[in-house]
Every structure is written in C-alpha cells, then in structure tokens.
Amino acid sequence: MQLSNFIRWFACAVLATPTLFAGEGKWTPQQVLQLDPLMLRKQGLELPVSRLWDPKRGSGLLAATVNIGGCSGGFVSSAGLILTNHHCLFGVVQEHSRPDRDLITNGFVARALEEELPGKTTRVTVPRKFTDVTAEVTAAAPAGASDLERSKVIDAKQKSLVAACESVAGSRCRVAVFDGGLQYVLIESLELSDVRLVYAPPRAIGEFGGEVDNWMWPRHTGDFAMARAYKDGKPYAPEFYFPIARNGVKPGDFVMVLGYPGRTVRSLTASEMAYQRDFYYALREQLYGEWIRALEDSTKDNASASITVAATLKSLSNVYKNAQGQLAGLARGRIIEKQQAHEQAVSAWAATRPAFSKGLEAKRDLDARASARRETATRDFLLQAISNGSLALKHATQIVRLAAEREKADADRETDYMEREIPRLRLRMDRDQKSLFPPADQAMFAAWIARALKLGAGERIEAVDRVFGSGEALKTLTYLYQSTKVTNLAERLQMFDESLAQLRARKDPLLGFAFLLEPELRAFQAADKTHDGAVARLRPEWRRAVIAHAGKPVASDANSTLRVSFAHVKGYMPRDGVTYLPQTTLAGMLEKHTGIEPFELPRAILEAAKSADAAKVPLNFLADADTTGGNSGSPTVNGRGEMVGLNFDRVWENVANDFGYNPDVARNISVDIRFLLWLLKDVEKADNLVRELQPAAR
Amino acid sequence: MQLSNFIRWFACAVLATPTLFAGEGKWTPQQVLQLDPLMLRKQGLELPVSRLWDPKRGSGLLAATVNIGGCSGGFVSSAGLILTNHHCLFGVVQEHSRPDRDLITNGFVARALEEELPGKTTRVTVPRKFTDVTAEVTAAAPAGASDLERSKVIDAKQKSLVAACESVAGSRCRVAVFDGGLQYVLIESLELSDVRLVYAPPRAIGEFGGEVDNWMWPRHTGDFAMARAYKDGKPYAPEFYFPIARNGVKPGDFVMVLGYPGRTVRSLTASEMAYQRDFYYALREQLYGEWIRALEDSTKDNASASITVAATLKSLSNVYKNAQGQLAGLARGRIIEKQQAHEQAVSAWAATRPAFSKGLEAKRDLDARASARRETATRDFLLQAISNGSLALKHATQIVRLAAEREKADADRETDYMEREIPRLRLRMDRDQKSLFPPADQAMFAAWIARALKLGAGERIEAVDRVFGSGEALKTLTYLYQSTKVTNLAERLQMFDESLAQLRARKDPLLGFAFLLEPELRAFQAADKTHDGAVARLRPEWRRAVIAHAGKPVASDANSTLRVSFAHVKGYMPRDGVTYLPQTTLAGMLEKHTGIEPFELPRAILEAAKSADAAKVPLNFLADADTTGGNSGSPTVNGRGEMVGLNFDRVWENVANDFGYNPDVARNISVDIRFLLWLLKDVEKADNLVRELQPAAR
C-alpha cells in the first residue's frame, strides 16, 4: 500500500465520514428554531424545522417524545403505544412477576388490549406548552434579599406558577431553570396516569451483558419495552407519533435523539467541577462500592434475598460504575483543565468589557464558594446519600419530615412534601418493601455510620455521635433493627399518616434517631438552599458573559426538560490500536452467548437465530449524540422523523461528558428498531404488535 | 454517507489492502527456491530469492537468523550483535541479578565490550548446511520390522548421522523430520557457546502488560534484548547480518518473518487433533491452572518466595493461557471440522487413484490409533507432565534415569541422556535451584498426585498407588519433602554423578518413589516410541496423498528448523463491532500506564516521553505471518531484507493456528525496531549501541 493509500485508509477507518457539525448541544425546542435551517438540512434533516416544533400551538413531532417515569419514550402508534427501554419499565415487570409467572425471566407479550398490565406508579407526561417566566420569577426577589430569602422567594414563586398551571385538570407543570437562573420556563404537560405494560423481552435480552457490558461497546442489548397510555379508560390518541423507519441506519447517517436528559454540569466553573470530582464522585465511588459489597455479602447463598435486593444492586452498580467513569473521563479528557482554559479566555475577553464586570465578579464568588464548601463536603455528601442507601433510614427520615411539613400550609412546604406529591411518596414507601431485606439494609446502614464516625472535627454529625458514638455502633444498630417498626410495611404506612406527636409517642428507636438527625438535615438543607440562592444570583451573571463571548446559541445544561441532539451514526477509537465500528449485529450477540448469565440467551432466540442471517440483523448502534441520564428510552429518529432506534446508554469513555462534550468519544448507544421487529416477528410471533408498529396502509 | 461510501469505508477499514497471497506457510529455505519468484516479487520481495538462500554455499540472508536457546534471533552487526526477545534472554538477566544490582528491574546496558555479561547456558547456532538424508534413514529400517524396532533403528540412524556430522569441531547437528517421516534432513550448524548479554530493558518495558496483555492486542511491549556471540574470545563476525531499516513499516507493507518455529500439528488427522484437544489441551488447562493456584497460594505474603517462583509462574501461565486459546480457537475456527472436510476431499480424490491406496489405509490406521490411545490418555498426560511440574519429582526421575542410562554405551542411550547432553542437564539442575521454593513445589506435587489417584481403573499408576494410595497422601508427601535430599543443591549434584547402586543405598524416599515410577515411565515411553514408529510408517503415506492432491508446494509442520513466512502488516476484526488497527504507539503505552504493575513505566521512560511526540513513536505491529512458539525473537524484515521489527507473540484469536491457519485472525505481533532505537537513543543514551546498529557509513 502506498502512503497515499495508507492516509486514505487511516482517514476512512477512523473518521468514517467528515462531520459538518459537532454533535455537541442538547437543544431546547425553542433553540432548534434559532439554529440555521440550512445547516440542519445539510446535516441531514429532511423535515422543515417547523414540523419538529410549533411554539404557538405548543406542538410538533417533539410532542411525541414523552417522559415516562424519569425516562424518555416515544409514541409509536395512533393508539398510545409507547416505546422505551426495558430498564425503564422494569419496575412494572417486577410488580407483576410472581414465582409461578416469572415475567422478569420470560418476558411479557400482551396479545390483546385486555392482557396489558397496569403499572401502579408509572406516569407519562406529554409536553404541551413552554412559557418564559424569567421576568416574573426574578422580579419576585426583592432587591437586597439575602441568599436564603432569595432562594425561598424564587421557590415560592415557582410553586405558585405551578399551582396555577395545574389547576387545569390533567395538567402536570413545572418551572425549569436554565443556566442557573438566567432563564425560567414554565412547562405545561398532559399527565397520563393509566399506563400499561404491553411488551417486555426476557431479561436475558433486555439486559443482555448485564453489569459486565453496562456502559460498554461493542454492545448487544435488546433494551426496549412497550407500554400503552390510556385516558379515560381508552387508549390515548396522541396528536403525533413516530412512524417506524422502513430502512435502517448505516454509518454516517444523520439521526436525532429526542428526550429528557436529566442533569449535566457543564456550566459549573472549573473550581466547582473540581469540587464535584473530589467529593461527590470520589465519595460516591467509595460509599457505593461499600454498599454493593454489603448487599452481595449479606445475600450470598440466599436466592430469595438476592432477588429482593436485585433492583437496588443494579441501581447502585450503575451509579458506582458511572462515578468511576466520571473520574476516569475527567482525567482522560482533561475536561476540568479545558474548562479552566475556556474560563480564562472568557475572562480575558470580558475584562475589557465593562458590561461583564459583574460576570467576572460572580465567577470569582462562585469559585470562592466552591473552595469554602470543601470544609464540610464529606458530611454533606453523607447526609445527601441517605436517600439512596438504607431504606429504613430513608423511610424514618421521610416519615419524620413529612409529619413536620404537614403542619404547614401546603404552599409553605418543601416541594417534595406538598399534597400533590404525597400519594406518590406513599406508593414508593409501599413498593420499597419488595426491595427490603433487613440484614442487607442494616449492612448498608452500618457502612454509612462507619463513615460518619470517621468525619473530621469540623463536620461531625451530632445525631450519629450521640446514638452510635459509644464504641458499640454495630450493637446499637442491631438493637435498632430489632426494635424498629419502620421496616414493617403496615406499621410504616400507618406512621405515614401520623402527626409528630403520635410518632414521638411510639418511642421507636429508629424514629428517635431520625428525630435527632432532623435538625441537622434541616440545617444542611438550609445551607444548601442559601448556596442555591447565591448561585441563582451569581451563575446567570457569569453565564451571560460566557454566552456573549460565544456569540451564537449555547445549549444549556440538561435539566430534565425536552431536548434534541443532532448527530451521526459513527464509531470511535477507544484506545491506541482499536477502532470501534458503529454497528453490531445478532451474530455478535450469539458470539457472546456462553450460556452463563449475563450472557445466556433464551432458547427461543437461539432457535430463531438459526434461520436468520445473524450478521444481517442489526442490534445496537453508536452515534455522536449529546446525551446523559434521563435520555434512557429516547427515540432515535432519522432525518424524516421516523424512528430508527431507542437510545439506552452512553459508552464508558463518554460518561464524563456531563462535564464537557468530547467529540472523540462522545457516543450514545441505541438499540436498532430492526432488532425489535425481528424479535417481535420471528421470536415472539406478536403479530398484533408488528401490525400496530407497521400498519400496512403506510 | 451514501451506500457506496459505506461499502468503501467498510472495505477499507476491515481489509486494509487486498492481499494477493495468504500468509499461510512456514517455508523451508529449500522450498523458498521452489516458490514462484514473480509471485514473491508481486508480494513485495525486492531481493532476488537467491540472496535469501544459496543451497550450494549453504548460506544467504537466512543464515543471519540464529537459534538462541530455543528462541529465534538475528545478527544485526558485523561484530556478532544479536537481537532477540527480552523473554528469550531473561534467564541471563536473572542469572546476573543480585539484590544490590537488580538487572531485572533496572535493565542492563553494556557500554563497552568488557561490560557484557556471559550467559552460563546460552548457546547460539548458525545454520550452515541442509542435507536430505531420507534415503539413508528409511533404508535403515529392515522390511517387516516391528514399530518399536523401526522407531529404535530410525533413532539410531539419526544419532549416527549426527555423531558423524558433529565430529567437525564447533558443529552442532540434528536430523529434522518433515511430514512425519516423508523427509529427513541433516542440519549442520555452527554452535557458538560464548554468548554475552549486551542490552536488556527494564522488565517493566520488556514485559509491559505482563500476563494481562500476554497474547493480547493492542499491545505495547518492548520485548527485545541484545546479546553478542563470541568465538575464540572475540566478537563473532557473521557472513550475513540484517541492516536496520531506515524507514519503518506501515499498514499493507510486505514483511518476512524468519525463525525457528517449534511445533505445529497441522498434518495430524482430524481424529488425532480431537485427541489432542480432548486430552492434551483440556488436561493442560486443568492441571496447569491448579499449579498456578498452588504457586500463588503458597507464596502469598512472602516476597522472596514470590521472586523465587516468578519465572516458573510466568512459564506456567503462558502455557495455561495458550491451552485456553487453543481450545477456544479450535472451537471458534471450527478447525477440526475443516480438517475433516479437507480429509474427505483428499480421500475422495485418492479413492480413484490406486497409487494412493496405501495412503488411505494409513489414514484409517492413524485414526484407529488415535481412538485407542484415549484409553490411557489421562495417565499418559500425567507422566509426560512430570517434566514441567514439581522440580523435586522431575529431578528425582532424571537422576534415576541418568544413572540407568549411564550403564549403557553412549549410542544406545536415549538422546537426552547422551554424553553430549550431560553438561547441559547438570547446569539446568544447578540453575533450577534458583526457582525452587519447597512449599510451592510440594503443592504442585500434591496436585499431580491428587489427579493420579483419581485415574480410571484401566490406567492406574502403580507407583502412586503404592506410595500415596493409603488415604494419607498429603502426610506421606510432607514426609517425603522433609526427608529427601533431592531438593538440596549440593546433594543433588552429587546424586547426579552416582550409580544406580549408590542411589539405592541412599534410601532417599523421593528417589525411592522415582525408582518405583521408573519402569512405568519406561513402559509408557516405549509405548510412545512404538506409536512413533507406527506414525513414521503411516504418516508419510498419508501426507504423500495430501501433497499430491494439493498439486503445489505444501509447507510442512514446524519442527524447530529454519523457516520463512511471507506476510503483510495488517489488522483484523476480533469480534463484532471491533477493528484492530495493525500498529500501536508509545502514546498507547503511556495511556496504559497506571503506575500499578504490570502497567508501571520506569520514570526514565515517562520523562523521555515528555519531549517525544508519543503518537509518532511506533511500538508494536501486526502482520499475517504464520508463526508459532520458537518464533520468539524472529527477525521481521522488509522486502529489502532490512530488519523492521522482532516477532514476539501471536494474538489470542490465533493461538489455535498450530492446528490450522485462519486468515481472518492469523496475526503475529512484532515490536517495532523504531521503538528500540528511540529507547536506546532517548532513554538509555546508549550511543555505542546506536552506532553499532546504525553505522553512519551505510
């Protein structure tokens, strides 16, 4: 091969196709309309932008993208059929699984509407209207307000806007904050609370590769499931839905990923990022690692206990692996260093422009706060972590807090304890019982206490010291678990409705600990609110400078609102000497099948694969879309707005893109719609669903 | 990207360059002259074939390829400088390492001839003459000889040919068997026994990636070292040596790999291959796995013991991983099934040609023998494995055998115990002491006994039953280790010179076990010889049919004789969704550096890398050369006969190519000569060596 050939080879192997447009940016519907339509057309968008979103009607193809229990999903039929990830509907599958009807293992197919299975807590929201309420919200804070006051006033204003909005029946509303408070948007959605499971593949397909392959490429996971939204007892008829693409994708193809990305932190300053790295992620990696070991050790050789903690273990492992990836990706991508360099450029630019002197000052202030927060960072982390660890501890603190909040007027309460949230909170407390295995729960609690007892002198948790500081912490804890009624479902649900006085009268030792902890939790949360208030004052100033310096639309951090990312199907080089191709096939899934979980395929798949050309059944694909948690189940659609796949993961090298987009490794993973169709047709013989997804009339 | 672009992309990413010539075939020097010179030129050979090998003079560029202690190597200067792998010279490095002069960790550079370090047992042989002696050897076996007689007579004939050949001072000779006896070739080499260590990199470079990366790609290992051959106390001046290429390689380039591949088994019938798979490799994987755990467990938390067993552990791990790879590769490449299909084609072709009826009969006979051997296959494996397990057991059996053989005339002895071998055997028994940690050795012995005690009724080892069959095997073994003198170096070396009577008089319990075992070992070896005799009778007949069916030169199985493989630099697809590029760089090595062994780079490398463009320092490369064990240290040369690298490994997917060449995954790994030059120049500042490798005059 001549050198010119080599260069061509290298270029084509590595780059696949020259990209005109970096995939960076999770654009809001409003921003999509501000982007250059010609540029979008060149990218591969074949629809007029107005088909995506019509701000006046509050509708368009984007409205077919729903939020389903914290995940994303998309309508795929005129009868309310929703496609999302298997892991997003796993709770419903679990809810209906019984020893004699193991839907987790066997999967589920509703062959008629009557067979569909209602999910107790699953809700779908369909976006309807976005209203800029920045002026109203910011006007609420009087000049000279303290940071805590500011935070509270802004909070109250948001609540009143939401309450007014939700006075319309069936509406679910929220105020979303952009750029730390540069913009506030009231989002009105239609809430559908009757959601039923239609299809779930066997877990061995939906989670093929399990924790081993999680975040990994090449991937071969059939991570999808289907639900149907009902309204007034009838299948909901959405105004828009995504037709299933007749042709699949190939390397270089344009795709859009639509969904509700949860949270990114790219607008943090480098110092704030370093704080997150050094405390939030580093401590997460440590504590969650301990929790995972605690769960594994305490359920070893106990099959039923293993099942009980399976979902918790899965969720902890996911967070743990994510923390590891964030730490590795931050270092590898030198993301904080790049942020610092970018800040310096913005600062130098702003220094000569008096209009941005407040921005520069705000940045210095943000950095100083990040520095000051380090002093109690470990304690703050532990207090925050209560909501993800021991269920007993979480429930006890929630019960005490709920009773306290109930004594206030609804509008004065914390958002999570307002009347509208109470039914959901109660359902979760009910459902949690399925995941509670007390010895495992106690082991997690013990790990938390051990860390709390090791805190520095300046950040002790007094409640822990008083109850567990005697040197007999484990004995005390065992006594707590033996005596408390919080772990008993019936008792707990009764506590849920009791007043502070009634709870005190119980003299339950775990509630006693929660009562001791309550003022410290409140103080920490107040400090957090004060910090939020300061940030709401400072960050907009600094972001204003950053955006002005860019001189073009800048995508805001993810905040669980509807976004679009424009991308291309594309592989990458994970490390020296290796190129990842952007597509995998059923053949690769069969290659991975060892017969040992998580690489154990059901017999039906192995049988059906025999009569398929497995190398021609596409399974997963990569694109350079800008995604994060919450994008699970996002419709991946082609330039004509047709669904080609469902986003379900990012690659390991791309986990730290929450801090910054790195085009070399920014890849999301979708499951190819053609695999779903193959599965429904050739394996499940679910003709009813195939017909609904591919109506002959089209 | 349009479909045509995709196809082009895919084709160029995966195939790199269309290959005119499959890399299959380890060609002898004589065969190279039979290949089509025009075809070789099209491949990229720029030299006339006669420059590679001149059979009349017994010389040519191939003569610059030496055998160095079972490895391959190449002369690279007019003053006898030899380049080979670090792992090939590791024994010499270890020999000269002391706690206060840790050459293993720090590496070694001789900055002048006087500083070079002699290797006690290292020998270099330079090929000089190849003579076909088939007629003489086969004529030695009288018509109607039994298989055992035939085997013994052929053996004796070979010995007499070797003895005559070695009567010339400095000659080292052997008779090599091709195609199971279709051809016998007397090979005369010059033996150089004064070999000195010139350069070894720190182990962290020479073994970078250790067992984790062993057999793996992408690879970043600086697996080379240098020695110098001396003759009569002066640097040896070879007639030929490999100049160092001025330009490196790039994807698609033609390369040749020259060396001494040890043993392949492609001429076995499918039934014989299945026997190897089911017993040899399957049992190896099991027993070696147990030995590895035994070594690890018994040296845990004991740093000095860990050092003692390090080399043994490394060698066991290598064999273990190889066995795993053979088993996986046989299954994945369906190699035995393909061999079966090929045999059927040959058989169908031969069935209509009476000249090959003996060949067909021979094949049926070979298959029947493979089937019959299964009955005692596990016992046979254990008896064979003695030479790789417990040193105490190995030494005891060798001492007893040596004393017995010494009572015979030299020519009647087994080859390994002839006078010419005795000094080397003694040196090995001496050097083994460095690797002996009795508790670990005992644990390996125990694992062997445990398996022997579980043998089927038809294949018991009587000596084991008598000594260890009481149900107190471990106690007995402990007593043996406490009482024996075999593990004491001085005593052992004394035993080495003793007669059978003297050894018996010692009443050493371990020698006692060896005496009991001796008749069973002899019986097994006789059966093995009988089998060899039968194979020597049968295989040539069958191979004659196979070769006639091919109608073109067919490369014989590797047999530790000089071979050439023609290849191209080329990546591969290890699995669905992944392409391996054929080259790695220093940048990838730095990426892998975690600071934790085996990914811990010396500070000097990290420092030097700072001022290098690491992505431009090539490190390892792949080609589709046909290699196996023994090819370690093989010169990898370009079409002009210039050295571009040194072969040191195959990829994991290619381990089973000992059974058959699979062009999709047949890749060997070389270390790029440019990395060596960078290391010598920029890290070691070894100007003397750089000048010798790159004389300005060229």
Image (tube, coloured by chain):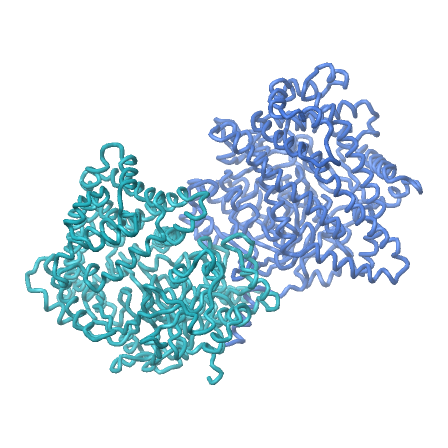
Chain colours: A blue, B cyan
A171 or A301, which lies in front?
A: A301
A372 or A317, which lies in front?
A: A372
The residue depicted at 25 percent of the width and 50 percent of the height is B384
Is B146 left or right of B453, judged from the image as shown? left
Quadrant for residue B113, please give it: bottom left
Quadrant for residue B139, please give it: bottom left
Q: Can residue A230 be seen in this view?
A: no
Q: In the rendered image of this protein, does residue A39 appear above or below residue B55?
A: above
Which residue sits furthest right? A143
How many tags in the picture? Answer: 0
Which residue sits furthest bottom? B697
Q: In the rendered image of this protein, does residue B607 appear above or below residue B638?
A: above
Q: Quarter of the image for the N terminus of chain B: give it.
A: bottom right
Q: Where's residue B243, x and y in %?
A: 42, 78
Is B272 left or right of A376, judged from the image as shown? left
Q: In the rendered image of this protein, does residue B657 appear above or below residue B462?
A: below
Quadrant for residue B19, please give it: bottom left
Q: In the rendered image of this protein, does residue A26 appear above or below residue A164?
A: below
Is A550 left or right of B420, judged from the image as shown? right
Q: Can residue B369 be seen in this view?
A: yes
